[in-house]
Image (cartoon, grey):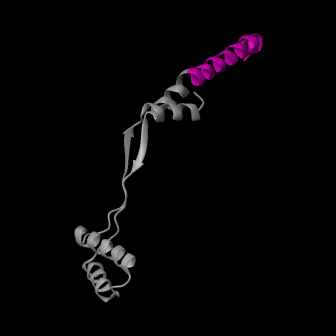
Amino acid sequence: MNWLKENWFRVGLLTVLTICIASAFYWYEWRPMQIRKGCSWIEKQTAARPKVTQADIDQAKIDVAAMPKNKQLFQSITEWRLTKLVAENPHPAVPSETYYETATPAEYSECLHSHGL
């Protein structure tokens, strides 16, 4: 304890100097490296597909058959829906998935700018 009382200034100076060096390392080396690493990839998601059952396909066919023929626009939209349902076949619901792609130079530059680099 006597040693600390005699060298308190040196210990304090060494502590402040260590904190300054660590802060400079964080700000000028570690932080930019983490930002560049995070900006090099862009997170994207696939589209989710809703569940389609055979009952949905049958109902679409009934809707088209029961519709009056003089409503051309509504009929074309319903037929498009029917062809989409029939083409897909019955399938369970598929949730969206997250994946990562390499950022384009424009996206990378925008990300760096938004993070202050």
Q: Position of residue 8 (x, y in %)?
A: 75, 14
115 vs 67, nearest the viewer: 67
Q: Which residues are magenta?
A: 1-28
- Residue reaching furthest front? 70
Q: Nearer the viewer, residue 2 or 28?
A: 28
The residue lying at 39 percent from left, 75 percent from top is 73
The image shows residue 13 at horizontal and vertical percentages of 72, 13
> Please, what is the dominant secondary structure of the magenta stretch?
helix
For the point 36% across and 85% down, which residue is it? Answer: 70
Examine the rendered structure and indicate whether residue 87 appears above or below residue 20: below
Residue 50 is situated, as x and y percent measured from the top left of the image, at: 35, 68
Up-down: is 54 above or below 101?
below
Front residue (pair 90, 92):
90
- Residue 20 figure quarter: top right
**Residue 96 occupies which quadrant of the picture?**
bottom left
In this rendering, is residue 92 above or below 65?
Answer: above
Looking at the rendered image, the quarter that the N terminus falls into is: top right
Residue at 41% over, 47% down:
44
59 sits left or right of 20 in the view: left
Horizontal and vertical percent for residue 68?
Answer: 35, 88
Residue sitting at 34 percent across and 64 percent down? 49
Residue 22: within the magenta?
yes
Q: Dividing the picture into quarters, in which one does residue 26 lie?
A: top right
Measured along the vertical axis of the image, is residue 95 above or below residue 111?
below
